[in-house]
Image (spheres, helix red, strand yellow):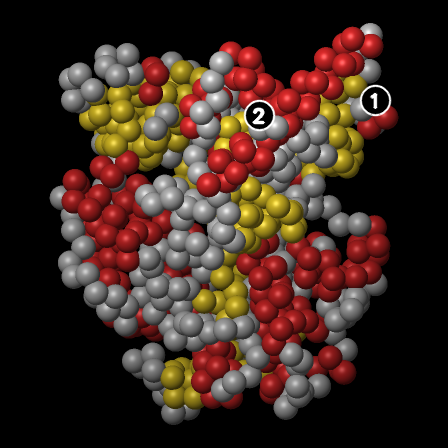
């Protein structure tokens, strides 16, 4: 034993002689890696014994973290002087990630070991390595500023006296370790929600506990609840919230009517989808003695019932929006409010907040008024019922309906002439049985009845925003803003559509709306319509809420807000409160508070949209799972280095053809031309190509469809 100790001590002493020499050499060549033979040559270390001592030195330094070792056993020290940035993690399935930051044009690559337990969506601080010319920026996470989420949905795998949760989320490459004390009754194969409780850099897997068992995979309720849980969206209200809602009276008192304009005798109606359960907007019409028309846009007065500081207010603020899945609405407000008290049901007196316009025959605004009102809707129309009145000129309230339709078409034509974009995305609907199983897929019709509602809601939103932003000037307000598109994305899109025989005429920002609308009209009804509309939308910026107004580029409005849907959107509640303050000559408070609420509302809106898409995708996969082997015509909707995505024209179901399954050649990805190309034969599969595909596999867990060329 004593001899071994002496030997260890001697080796340590000898190897330490090289430490300063090695560290000084690698520091002078920071960012470059060398194996021990190369280092020995550079330092003129000769002889087998001395080289072994050098290897021991390198091992010691790497073990203490003073230098770094690659998987190919090369040694290096990081370049310094790169600085730090803050950004968001975009994690890949392979475990490494990219940091997206406003501080850099390029994303920063971070290896798996340098992520320091950061996960997808986390806000992190990153130390940058000095960037060599032409190389991608690289760095390492030095601190996690904010976790994007702490709960994950997945499938429980029981192993002896512990378990793992295998996450559904494709951006979560790590299984969660569940100790026996954290299993909490979950059974093998069930779907559950787990919360991460601990994860240090020494552990490969985060430690977590099961906080909710959702049920067995494949069951409709399990899967819908799993989607909501994945995006950390609620699907029920607490008893305390329901109790507070139950205490709100549905009776309208004389005090409630004080200061309100009475529209109960004015012809008024609602138009909504046939399956709608809440009605937050109504339209009134009457001819004035001077021959002009009075059009009232009446919106549920939600803020009359929801008071600041109440549990209902806090819940609405946190949810920020209602969530629409394929089979249900998860409302922002409890049903007593959303479907009963606030809903503008026919033949009931309702408290409303209104924008009232006097319009001449050419739909020009002669005067306008904003304030609180009371209405009594005469008729509830579905879109199909309203469309029938417009098309035939016959039916209930035909005079009002037809005149509003005429005015709406004038407003619509004027809006597009001013540069508003013409986007009408195809909306997928499912025919579900009582168990939630999809029996068929159809597309929602968008007719002139939809346009009637849309134009008057846009008018109210725009004019309220103009009143605050233009007339009052400088007042804190909540705007709906939409930035100009990225020129590079537009150039890329313009290049792509040429393969279909289309082009964008003109390249200036002023001419883009006109040329884009011409294109969208040209593709209407064509097989490539959905693909081109989808790519056009991707080229555009995303609309968000903000207190800083930059206008709404897509609508070509200098001022725009959301005033017309307070039952399902919290920003509309903020707009109602701010408008009330200014009409009453009161000060609503500082801008900073509202900006934070805008950011939260924008975030929740994105989550709700992602949840909706996930529910649609799940039902599409479920629908196609019973059509394995069927052949369909499709359009290549995406091209990646691992394969091509194809969207079936008949039902919009998108699936992948893996590049490994294209056996007639070795295919390579050509990013600049949106295609994969065979190395030997030169055959191409390009974005937008029409192909026939066979359904091979439907993976409900991953919400993925696999196709192959038919």
Pointer 1 with pointer 2, Cβ within 8 A: no
Residue 97 location, x and y as percent?
A: 51, 37
Q: Is residue 668 above or below residue 403?
A: above
Point out which mark residue 62 bears.
Answer: none
- Quadrant containing the C terminus is top left
Question: At x 78% / y 69%, what residue is drawn?
Answer: 309
Residue 94 in the image: x percent, y percent? 51, 27
| Residue on which disc 1 sits | 180
In three-dimensional space, the C-alpha distance between marks 1 and 2, rounded to whole angstroms, equals 42 Å
Could you say where residue 564 lies in the image, as x and y percent from the top left?
A: 53, 68
First in sequence: mark 1 or mark 2? 2
In the figure, residue 367 lies in which quadrant? bottom left
Task: Name the residue at 82% across, 15% down.
Answer: 161
Front-lying residue, 47 or 243: 47
What's the residue at 58%, 28% (across, down)?
18
Q: Secondary structure at mark 1?
A: helix
x 78%, y 14%: residue: 5
Which structural element holds mark 2? helix
In this rendering, the answer to whether 105 lies above or below 598 is above
Residue 62 shows in this picture: no
Q: Give the class, few, some or many, for how many residues have Cα within 10 Å of label 1's Cα (few <14, many ≥20).
A: some
Which numbered marker is on residue 58?
Answer: 2
């Amino acid at each position: 034993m004593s001899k071994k100790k002496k030997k260890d001590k001697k080796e340590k002493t000898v190897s330490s002689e090289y430490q300063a020499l090695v560290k000084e050499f690698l520091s002078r060549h920071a960012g470059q890696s060398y194996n021990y033979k190369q280092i020995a040559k550079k330092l003129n270390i000769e002889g087998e014994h001395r080289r072994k001592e050098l290897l021991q030195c390198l091992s010691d330094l790497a073990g203490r973290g003073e230098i770094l070792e690659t998987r190919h056993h090369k040694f290096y020290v990081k370049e310094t002087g790169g600085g730090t940035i803050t950004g968001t993690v975009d994690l890949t399935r392979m475990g490494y990630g990219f940091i997206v930051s406003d501080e850099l044009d390029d994303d920063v690559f971070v290896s798996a070991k340098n992520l320091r337990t950061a996960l997808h969506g986390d806000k992190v601080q990153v130390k940058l390595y000095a960037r060599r010319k032409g190389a991608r920026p690289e760095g390492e996470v030095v601190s996690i500023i904010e976790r994007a989420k702490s709960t994950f949905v997945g499938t429980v795998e029981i192993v002896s006296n512990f378990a793992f949760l295998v996450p559904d989320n494709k951006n979560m490459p790590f299984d969660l370790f569940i100790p026996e004390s954290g299993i909490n009754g979950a059974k093998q194969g069930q779907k559950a929600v787990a919360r991460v409780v601990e994860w240090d850099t020494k552990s490969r897997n985060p430690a977590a506990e099961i906080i909710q068992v959702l049920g067995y995979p494949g069951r409709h309720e399990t899967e819908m609840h799993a989607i909501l849980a994945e995006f950390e969206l609620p699907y029920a209200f607490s008893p305390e919230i329901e109790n507070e809602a139950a205490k709100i009276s549905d009776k309208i008192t004389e005090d409630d009517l004080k200061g309100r304009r009475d529209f109960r005798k004015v012809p008024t109606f609602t138009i909504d989808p046939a399956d709608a359960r809440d009605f937050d907007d109504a339209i009134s019409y009457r001819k004035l003695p001077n021959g002009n028309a009075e059009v009232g846009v009446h919106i549920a007065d939600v803020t009359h019932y929801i008071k600041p500081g109440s549990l209902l207010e806090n819940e609405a603020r946190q949810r920020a929006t209602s969530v629409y899945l394929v089979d249900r609405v998860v409302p922002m407000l409890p049903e007593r409010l959303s479907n009963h008290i606030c809903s503008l049901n026919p033949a009931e007196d309702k408290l409303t907040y209104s924008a009232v316009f006097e319009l001449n025959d050419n739909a020009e605004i002669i005067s306008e008024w904003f304030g609180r009102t009371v209405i009594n809707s005469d008729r509830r129309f579905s879109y199909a019922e309203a469309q029938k009145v417009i098309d035939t000129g016959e039916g209930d309230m035909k005079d009002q309906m037809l005149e509003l339709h005429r005015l709406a078409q004038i407003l619509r034509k004027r809006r597009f002439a001013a540069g508003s974009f013409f986007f009408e995305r195809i909306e997928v609907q499912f025919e579900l049985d009582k168990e939630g199983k999809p029996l068929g897929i159809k597309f929602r019709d968008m007719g002139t009845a939809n346009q009637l509602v849309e134009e008057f809601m846009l008018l109210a939103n725009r004019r309220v925003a103009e009143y605050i932003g233009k007339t009052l000037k400088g007042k804190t307000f909540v705007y709906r803003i939409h930035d100009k598109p990225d020129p590079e994305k537009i150039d890329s899109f313009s290049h792509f559509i040429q393969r279909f025989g289309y082009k964008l005429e003109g390249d200036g920002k002023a001419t883009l709306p006109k040329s884009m609308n011409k294109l969208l009209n040209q593709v209407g009804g064509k097989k490539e319509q959905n693909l081109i509309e989808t790519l056009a939308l991707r080229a555009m910026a995303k609309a968000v809420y903000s207190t800083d107004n930059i206008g709404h580029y897509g609508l070509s409005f200098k001022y725009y807000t959301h005033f017309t849907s307070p039952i399902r959107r919290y920003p509309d509640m903020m707009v109602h409160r701010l408008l009330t303050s200014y009409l009453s000559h009161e000060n609503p408070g500082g801008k900073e508070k509202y900006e934070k609420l805008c950011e939260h509302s924008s975030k929740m809106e994105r989550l709700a949209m992602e949840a909706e898409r996930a529910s649609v995708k799940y039902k599409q996969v479920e629908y196609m799972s019973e059509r394995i082997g069927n052949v369909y015509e499709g359009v290549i909707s995406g091209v990646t280095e691992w394969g091509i995505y194809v969207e079936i024209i008949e039902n919009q179901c998108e699936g992948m053809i893996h590049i490994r399954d294209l056996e007639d050649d070795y295919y390579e990805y050509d990013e600049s031309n949106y295609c994969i190309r065979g190395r030997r034969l030169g055959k191409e599969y390009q974005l937008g190509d029409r192909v026939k595909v066979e359904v091979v596999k439907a993976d409900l867990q991953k919400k993925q469809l696999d196709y192959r060329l038919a």
